[in-house]
């Protein structure tokens, strides 16, 4: 009985979200689109953060890399103007595999460390990309940013539905992992790497796989984001607040639970949008930071765990 | 090169705190920036002399360290390591974000529309037997050596220092023999935060800082810790000097913007080829 109510609710929410572009104002639809993008990243973060308990503060790097790759291919590649509308697909076709390869490569140094070191050094990925963008202005536009030609922009409903599909896809990936052999292997590695290695689970290969799986939807989100924004600045795509938002969403909602990122996205983005409309005299980022302090100190397991009363 | 001493010092205070309390303080670098900001405020805008303002910074940030310990460390100290880690990352990241935003915002509004923290000395150069030496660099280096020496002596010879080392080596074991982790963490954070803030004041004698560089400095400190070998004091020194040298060379040959990239490349190379760090034995 309760299961049926759950499914009915889910269906209702999905139908509601599908109708949104026809009902709400442009601003709110855009805000929802951003929410989907961040939800995708948060769900991806949870592949490593939830299943393997490796806090990856660098999830935003995949997003930023793919966004910049899309923009750079569309503006700089000599073949792009000749392809017409197809150029977008070519750019996305370059950006996503590129990001996946990047994820597979950085796995080699990153998984040499664990715990706090892993967390902060993964954030180094974001900082390194920031610096590369700022220092290769001929390619990436540097601090002036890069503009994608207007003919490639998707309409708002297109972007909205793509974002929605992506977010649903990312959450589904997590629930599939949770039920699969891979998920069991991840949990075994999380609980004891040595024990898991002893029964034949290769720690590095599995972590690398997790990282690559987690990079693909984030990369796709980066592509859509780049196309929708049209103009990319380092700060909007790779800024500290943007790249850490997904991590915060996952942690607030509850890491390690399929619904955690969804709940976190609703709460954090709700607060975020609320703050924009509240127009307080204090900078929003500061309030945002203080809220994080409160959440970190009082709700360390995330809200899902309070609701399910499992605790830590 | 002299910056290497400062890097080693902030790496060292970070890693001592991390090893004894398992709290990862993401706001570490931000506290350093705040120290630099306060020193700039005291000297440039209130006309205090440099030693006096360094004393002021030390006093203020010793209090700040006490406060940090009471709010961010003490309430979570009894939890599991993993919970402490996640909690401290979220909470101190929030703190860093709030502090740097407020600092940038109000500095721009009240003090200077383009926030940049820097200090200067009355006599920038001294001459010793015909060799011109930069007083700033000498001073920074002397400070780093003295501060690291003080830290070393405290850890080796005082009861609190011994307790801290015991906690870092074997947390449960230390608890069983009666070490009080709260007293240790209070001492570590009071000392660590004030030294970090003073490091900020000395750092800006050569290189100016802006309000938003805090998290990067935390990362630099962690890079130093990992390069040198987790838990190794000589390793932190070597790592700090190495980064200082890399920075100097990159600035000279390629351009200042590339030094963060070089830092991370060196870090990645070391992680792939020598994962335990340069001087790290066990992990």
Image: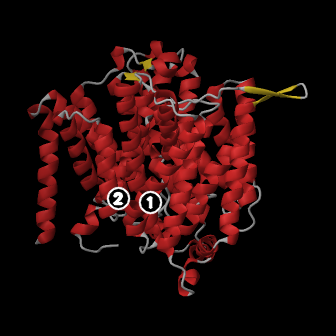
Q: Is residue B244 left or right of residue B56?
A: right
User: Regarding mark 1 in the picture, which secondary structure is present there?
Assistant: helix
Q: Is residue B145 left or right of residue A117?
A: right
Residue A65 visible in the current orientation: no
Q: Is residue A42 above or below residue B109?
A: below
Q: Is residue A185 above or below residue A220?
A: below
Q: What is the crowding at mark 1: few (fewer than 14 residues within 10 Å), some, or many (at least 20)?
A: many
- Residue B66 is labelled as 1
Residue A163: quadrant of the picture = top left
Q: Quadrant of the N terminus of chain A?
A: bottom left
Q: Residue at x 19, y 33 (%)?
A: A279
- Residue B172 is labelled as none
User: Regarding mark 2 in the picture, which secondary structure is present there?
Assistant: helix
Q: Is residue B55 left or right of residue B99?
A: right
Residue ranking furthest to the right = B129
Nearer to us in this view, B37 or A16: B37
Marks 1 and 2 belong to one chain: no
Q: Is residue A154 left or right of residue B96?
A: left
Q: Which residue is mark 2?
A: A296
Q: Residue at x 46, y 30 (%)?
A: B46
Residue A175: quadrant of the picture = bottom left
Q: Position of residue B135 (x, y in %)?
A: 73, 32
């Amino acid at each position: 009985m309760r299961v049926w109510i759950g499914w009915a609710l889910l269906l209702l929410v999905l139908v509601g979200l599908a109708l949104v572009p026809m009902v709400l104002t442009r601003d709110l639809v855009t805000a929802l689109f951003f929410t989907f993008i961040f939800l995708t990243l948060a769900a991806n973060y949870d592949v490593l953060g939830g299943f393997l308990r490796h806090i990856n503060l660098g999830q935003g790097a995949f997003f930023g890399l793919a966004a910049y790759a899309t923009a750079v291919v569309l503006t700089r590649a000599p073949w792009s103007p000749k392809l017409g509308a197809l150029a977008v697909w070519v750019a996305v076709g370059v950006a996503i595999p590129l990001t996946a390869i990047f994820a597979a490569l950085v796995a080699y140094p990153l998984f040499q460390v664990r715990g706090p070191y892993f967390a902060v050094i993964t954030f180094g990925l974001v900082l390194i990309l920031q610096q590369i963008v700022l220092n290769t202005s001929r390619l990436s536009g540097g601090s002036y940013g890069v503009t994608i030609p207007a003919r490639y922009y998707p309409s708002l409903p297109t972007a909205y539905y793509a974002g929605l599909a992506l977010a649903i896809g990312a959450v589904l990936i997590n629930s599939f992992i949770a039920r699969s052999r891979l998920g069991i292997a991840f949990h075994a590695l999380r609980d004891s790497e040595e024990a898991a290695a002893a029964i034949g689970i290769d720690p590095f290969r599995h972590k690398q796989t997790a990282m690559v799986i987690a990079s693909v939807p984030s990369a796709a989100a980066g592509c859509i984001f780049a196309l929708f924004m049209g103009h990319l600045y380092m700060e909007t795509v790779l800024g500290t607040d943007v790249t850490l938002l997904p991590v915060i969403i996952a942690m607030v909602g509850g890491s390690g639970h399929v619904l955690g990122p969804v709940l976190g996205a609703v709460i954090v983005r709700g607060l975020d949008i609320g703050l924009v409309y509240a127009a307080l005299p204090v900078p929003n980022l500061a309030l945002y930071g203080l809220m994080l302090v409160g959440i970190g100190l009082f709700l360390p397991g995330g809200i899902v765990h309070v609701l399910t009363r499992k605790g830590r | 090169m002299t910056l290497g001493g400062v890097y080693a010092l902030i790496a060292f205070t970070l890693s001592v705190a991390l090893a004894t309390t398992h709290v990862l303080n993401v706001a570490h670098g931000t506290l350093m920036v705040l120290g630099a900001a306060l020193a700039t405020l005291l000297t440039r805008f209130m006309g205090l002399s440099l030693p006096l303002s360094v004393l002021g910074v030390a006093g203020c940030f010793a209090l700040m360290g006490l406060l940090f310990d009471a709010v961010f460390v003490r309430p979570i100290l009894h939890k599991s390591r993993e919970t402490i880690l996640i909690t401290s990352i979220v909470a101190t990241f929030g703190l860093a974000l709030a502090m740097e935003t407020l600092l940038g915002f109000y500095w721009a509004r009240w003090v200077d529309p383009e926030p940049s923290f820097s200090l200067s000395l009355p006599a920038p150069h001294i001459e010793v037997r015909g060799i011109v030496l930069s007083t700033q660099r000498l001073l920074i280096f002397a400070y780093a050596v003295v501060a690291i020496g003080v830290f070393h002596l405290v850890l080796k010879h005082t009861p609190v220092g011994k307790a801290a080392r015991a906690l870092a080596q074997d947390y449960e074991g230390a608890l069983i023999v009666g070490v009080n982790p709260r007293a240790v963490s209070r001492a570590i954070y009071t000392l660590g935060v004030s030294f970090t803030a003073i490091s900020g004041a000395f750092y800006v004698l050569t290189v100016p800082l802006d309000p938003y560089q805090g998290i990067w400095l935390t990362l630099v400190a962690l890079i130093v810790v990992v390069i040198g070998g987790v838990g190794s004091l000589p390793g932190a020194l070597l790592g700090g000097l190495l980064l200082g040298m890399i920075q100097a060379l990159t600035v000279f040959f390629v351009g200042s913007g590339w030094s963060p990239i070089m830092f991370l490349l060196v870090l990645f190379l070391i992680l792939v080829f020598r994962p335990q760090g340069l001087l790290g034995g066990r992990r």
